[in-house]
Amino acid sequence: MGKKTILSGIQATGNLTLGNYLGAIQNWVKMQDEYDCYYMIADLHSLTVRNDPEVLRKRAMQVLAIYVASGLDPEKNTIFLQSQVDAHVKLNWILNCYTYMGELNRMTQFKDKSAKHADNINSGLFTYPVLMASDILVYNADLVPVGEDQRQHLEITRDIAERFNAIYGQTFVIPEAFIGEQGARIMGLQDPTAKMSKSATNLNDVIFLNDSPEDIRKKLKKAVTDSENCVRYDKENKPGVSNLMTIYGLIEGKSMDEVEKEFEGKGYGDFKNKTAEVVVKKLQPLQEKYYDLLENPEKLKEIYESGAKKAQKKANKIVNEVYQKVGLIINS
Ligand code: ATP
Ligand code: LTN
């Protein structure tokens, strides 16, 4: 049997964060040998909020450089820009006609984003999950590695695929979310009850992957904790400390019990310093590669161009099959 297929992506809406890395990219890197992996930059999804065109193009290249600098090998994985593979948009239209308004109305990300962008509640924001479903189904992906916040979008994807299959016969693989246990939700450093997000307004809430060591130390020093001064995992009552423990544990490959033991009898000062050191150590080599790649736009171009070609091949097959099934006429 061939390798199973994986697809995932990240929007180019800002600098990537430690949440993106620990919740998504780190898992992708682990999967690249075992699976046939498609990793895209979700630049079309980025258009659901307003962007400066030049900034969006720059951000897309930054996301690509982060993918590669994090250890995704462009030879082993198909790495591409969503907008360069037309099949996504073609399938998107079809699937729009198999998705109900009521289903989309229940999406919590739509509610959150409409509250954040009250002046621009566009229909792209509303139908965002249908494009995401198209991204996944157009490769017949078996697994989709994402953070916890994307679970609902995976569920609607499965519902759409099942609905289509029920009408037209077996067409789509029903994909499963792959959500790592611990890194599924890295929280903000200032507000540990909300997820760390690249579009956050309070910069102290977020560690960006390209933050300098000084900034990382400063931000972690300021991170909200509690008055107990005891490194103990308790998400409900100690969300700040538990979040830092998660970050520490994920980077060091340690369980929460092990982290508790390591810092027994030590205060938050020590714990924060140590956490800052492991984050800096993890990000330093990544940043070096990242800046090297950004200075080499030709190399980046080579990666996304050959990625798009490979992706297009697979995606076109599935779109043609869908066109045929719904009654469209395909040019031979
Ligand atoms: P935005 O703030 O623009 O909505 P974001 O930081 O949430 O962006 P996305 O592009 O929506 O990033 O997400 C990319 C991937 O990173 C998804 O798989 C998402 O689940 C994951 N991810 C994002 N933030 C976190 C987080 N704080 N913890 C764990 N995973 C995360
Ligand atoms: N909505 C996702 C980004 C995304 C995605 C996808 C993730 C767009 N298309 C397909 C997995 C599979 C997010 O993380 N905000």
Image: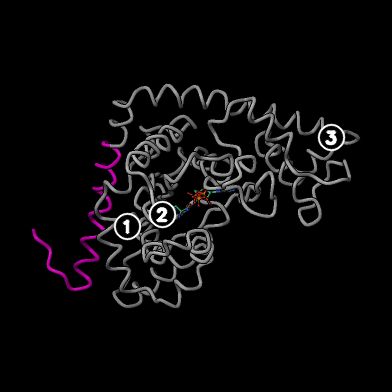
Residue assigned mark 1:
138
Residue assigned mark 2:
49
Dot placed on the residue nearer the N-terminal end, 1 or 2: 2
Q: Going 53% across and 63% down the picture, which residue do you hit?
A: 115
Asked which colour scheme the image uses, the reply is: one colour
Task: Tell me the element at label 3.
Answer: loop
186 sits to left or right of 28: right
Crowding at dot 1, Cα within 10 Å, few <14 / some 14-19 / many 20+, comes out as: many
Disc on res. 263: 3
How far apart in space, not on screen, are marks 1 and 2 (Cα)?
A: 24 Å
Q: Magenta region's main secondary structure?
A: helix
Task: Tell me the element at label 2.
Answer: loop
Q: Do callouts 1 and 2 mark residues in contact (Cβ within 8 Å)?
A: no
117 sits to left or right of 202: left
Q: Nearer the viewer, residue 207 or 32?
A: 207
Task: Tell me the element at label 1.
Answer: loop
* Magenta residues (range): 305-332
- Mark 1 or 3: the one toward you: 3
Does the stretch in magenta take in 35? no
Name the kind of residue labelled 2 in the image: Val
Name the kind of residue labelled 3 in the image: Phe
- Please provide percent x and percent y for residue 41: 38, 44
Name the kind of residue labelled 1 in the image: Val
Dot placed on the residue nearer the N-terminal end, 3 or 2: 2
Q: Nearer the viewer, residue 94 or 61?
A: 61
